[in-house]
């Protein structure tokens, strides 16, 4: 059974994978005419908050965390972008500086598309502009849900919900009934949940006792997503 039949995953997860998918050949050729690719090591910065954007980034392989730093330089992860997603376009559209930072969560291969090419295709392509508008509307709805999540849910509920979302991002060659491994540090997980590391470790221990998950080093293996859905109490 699909996760979509059990849980409204789209309410909690951005999806920019469709933005560039199956664009007309002429648009795609123009968009990628000056594209470059680069490998990023885990933790390496893709772009930094406050910098001026010069293009957009397409994640060919790997994962990227988008985050903000508070006054004490603590990371607050806003979103985990997955393979196939596009990041960095908000600042371009707003003609403003980056509102957040992005760094590779694991070794990643990322393509860079210059802003001149992106904006030219956006101006001429009704398909791309319509998709982008739809995506921005969806992202706003997700952010509203996230604000509600942090104000109304307990740490236990928030962690359960984020494990559900992360489970979808870490699916590789997935078959039904197969456990999914989430490879993320406890510090990053705490930042996603909006709590401290000690709380995450404590609640993960509780989930382990109930056989909902198991761990191997930093890896979290989800065995029972149904129980996580029940704990998340998303309704």
Image: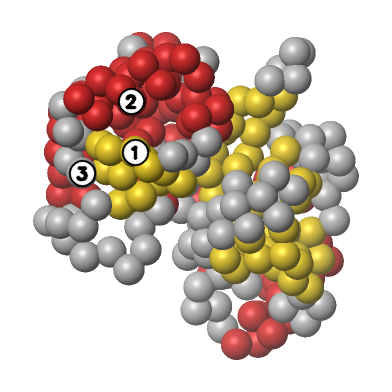
Q: Residues within 10 Å of mark 3 (few under 14, many from 20)?
A: some
Q: Residue furthest bottom?
A: 25
Q: Residues within 10 Å of mark 1 (few under 14, many from 20)?
A: some
**Mark 3 vs mark 2: which is more N-terminal?**
2
**Mark 1 vs mark 3: which is more N-terminal?**
1
Q: Give whichever of 148, 230 is nearer the camera.
A: 230
Residue 18 rendering spot, x and y as whole percentages: 47, 65
Q: Give whichever of 129, 165 is nearer the camera.
A: 165
Disc 3 is placed on an element classified as loop
- Residue at numbered disc 3: 223
Residue at left 66%, top 65%? 109
Residue 117 rendering spot, x and y as whole percentages: 78, 71
Residue at left 66%, top 26%? 75
Q: Give whichever of 212, 109 is nearer the camera.
A: 212
- Tag in front: 1 or 2: 1
Q: Give the label on residue 215, or none.
A: 1
Disc 2 is placed on an element classified as helix
Q: Give the label on residue 204, or none.
A: 2
Quarter-of-image position of residue 217: top left
**Mark 1 vs mark 2: which is more N-terminal?**
2
Quarter-of-image position of residue 171: bottom left
Q: CA distance from mark 1 to mark 3?
A: 11 Å
Q: Are marks 1 and 2 in contact (CB under 8 Å)?
A: yes
């Amino acid at each position: 059974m699909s996760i979509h039949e059990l849980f409204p995953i789209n309410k909690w997860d951005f999806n920019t994978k469709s933005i560039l998918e199956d664009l007309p050949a002429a648009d795609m050729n123009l968009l990628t005419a000056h594209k470059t690719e680069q490998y990023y090591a885990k933790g390496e910065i893709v772009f930094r908050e406050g910098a001026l954007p010069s293009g957009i980034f397409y994640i060919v392989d790997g994962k990227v965390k988008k985050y903000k730093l508070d006054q004490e330089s603590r990371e607050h992860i806003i979103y985990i972008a997955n393979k196939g997603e596009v990041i960095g376009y908000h600042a371009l559209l707003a003609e403003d500086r980056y509102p957040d930072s992005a760094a590779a969560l694991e070794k990643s291969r990322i393509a860079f598309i210059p802003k001149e090419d992106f904006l030219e295709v956006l101006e001429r392509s009704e398909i791309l502009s319509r998709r982008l508008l739809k995506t921005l509307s969806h992202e706003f709805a997700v952010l509203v849900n996230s604000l509600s999540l942090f104000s109304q849910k307990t740490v236990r509920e928030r962690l359960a919900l984020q494990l559900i979302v992360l489970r979808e991002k870490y699916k590789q060659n997935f078959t039904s009934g197969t456990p999914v491994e989430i490879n993320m540090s406890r510090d990053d997980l705490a930042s996603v949940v909006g709590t401290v590391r000690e709380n995450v470790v404590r609640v993960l221990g509780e989930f382990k006792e109930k056989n909902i998950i198991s761990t191997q080093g930093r890896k979290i293996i989800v065995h029972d997503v149904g129980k996580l859905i029940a704990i998340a109490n998303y309704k």
